[in-house]
Structure formats: structure tokens, C-alpha cells
Amino acid sequence: MLLDLTQSQLVLIDYQIALMPAMADSALVLANAIRLGQMAALLDVPAWATEQNPSRLGRSVEAISALGLRTLSKMHFSAVEEGLGEWLRPPAKPAAGNARSLPKHLQKASQEAPQRNAIVMAGCEAHVCLLQTALDCLEDEFEVWVVTDACGSRTERNRDAAFDRLAGAGAELVTTEMVAFEWLRTAEHPHFKAVHGLIK
């Protein structure tokens, strides 16, 4: 199964000022997160960010903040516990007008928000906030695609244990380049050169 651009949303988890220096391979992890955000902007993929306890860990690093993503501040390790699920799957809009005054067959049905159920996710720490958010998204029946080269933990052992557990739970493990080329699908895509330039 390939990742579908039209079904995708991006979530960047906790790339924060006090956290990033402690991550293994932090420069590469952050560079790939930025690429993901830039690709999402080019390809009109809805994208979100989170910040864990920002009063203690600081805000998102400048390069993530510069992406202009709507950002959820949280205290729970799982962003779903703090309302991320409602951002990813907004409720249906109520019917407009005075529906009670119309016969049933003339009433407009509630307008369903377009569903994008493939959640492309990356973040820190992989074995804590990323893992718990991803598992809760799976529980809520989203497809979860974890971008492994944009995820970090303080130790490789913790990061890799998170990936093993996520794969066992049904998440797809991908890389930044996999996401790029699956979102594009063809070298004839109008944004191929721009996206290719980001990952070269």
C-alpha cells in the first residue's frame, strides 16, 4: 500500500528548544522534519505541530516555528489526549438554516468534513510522545505512517524499541524520501522539481 497524498496529514511532534540537543542524530532528525513540513506546504497537505510542556522544554525550534503550523501545547505525552484527534478528524458541520421548519426530505444533511485518515507522523522522543500519540491514533482508526529518519530519542535503543513496537501495532515505517516520492507518484508532478530539491 502506497501513501496517498490526498488522504494525508502531517504531525510534527515536540521539536523543542530544550529537547533537540539531547536527541541522537539531532541535526539529521531536525533537517528531515523541516523537509517534511516544507513538502507538506508545497503539496497542500494539512500539517500540525505539538509542544510538550513548553514552559519547561521551550517552544518549537525556530525552523519548525517558521513553518507556521497550528501548534498544540500539551502536558499528556499523547497529543490525542489533548485534542489532536479533533484537529485530524473535525466533526461534521451542522446543517445550515432552520432545519426544523422543513420537512425531512428537504432538510440538508450535516456536511461531513473531508476525511484524511493517513497520518504521517514524526517527532521526539520516539519512545514517549511519538509512540503514545501514534498508538492512540491507531486506536482511533487512523492509518499511521511513522517517518523513522525524522524521529529521535536520547538513545538509539529507545528509538529502535519504539519502531519495533509501532510496527507490531500496525504503523507503517517509512523515511522522508519514501514520503516525498509516494506523495509525488510521478516525475511529471508539477511540484516534482521543488520537492526533489528539498531531499537532494
Image (tube, grey):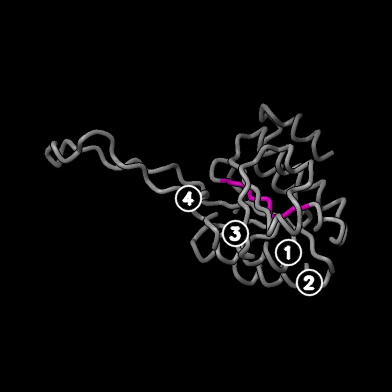
For the magenta stretch, what is the residue range?
8-16
Q: Is residue 14 magenta?
A: yes
Q: Are marks 3 and 4 in contact (CB under 8 Å)?
A: no
Q: Residue at x 60, y 39 (%)?
A: 45
Residue tagged 1: 126
Name the kind of residue labelled 2 in the image: Asn
Q: Residue at x 60, y 34 (%)?
A: 44
In what quadrant of the picture does the N terminus appear? bottom right
Between 62 and 144, the one nearer to me in the picture: 62
Task: Please tell me whether residue 185 is drawn above or below residue 146 in the rendered image.
Answer: above
What crowding class fits label 2: few (fewer than 14 Cα within 10 Å), some (14-19), or many (20 or more)? some
Secondary structure beneath label 1: helix
Q: Residue at x 71, y 32 (%)?
A: 187
Q: CA distance from mark 1 to mark 3?
A: 13 Å
Q: Position of residue 136 (x, y in %)?
A: 55, 65
Residue tagged 3: 79
Between 109 and 52, the one nearer to me in the picture: 52
Residue tagged 2: 158
Q: Position of residue 163 (x, y in %)?
A: 72, 67
Secondary structure beneath label 2: helix
Residue tagged 4: 89
Q: CA distance from mark 2 to mark 1?
A: 7 Å
Q: Position of residue 174 (x, y in %)?
A: 71, 55
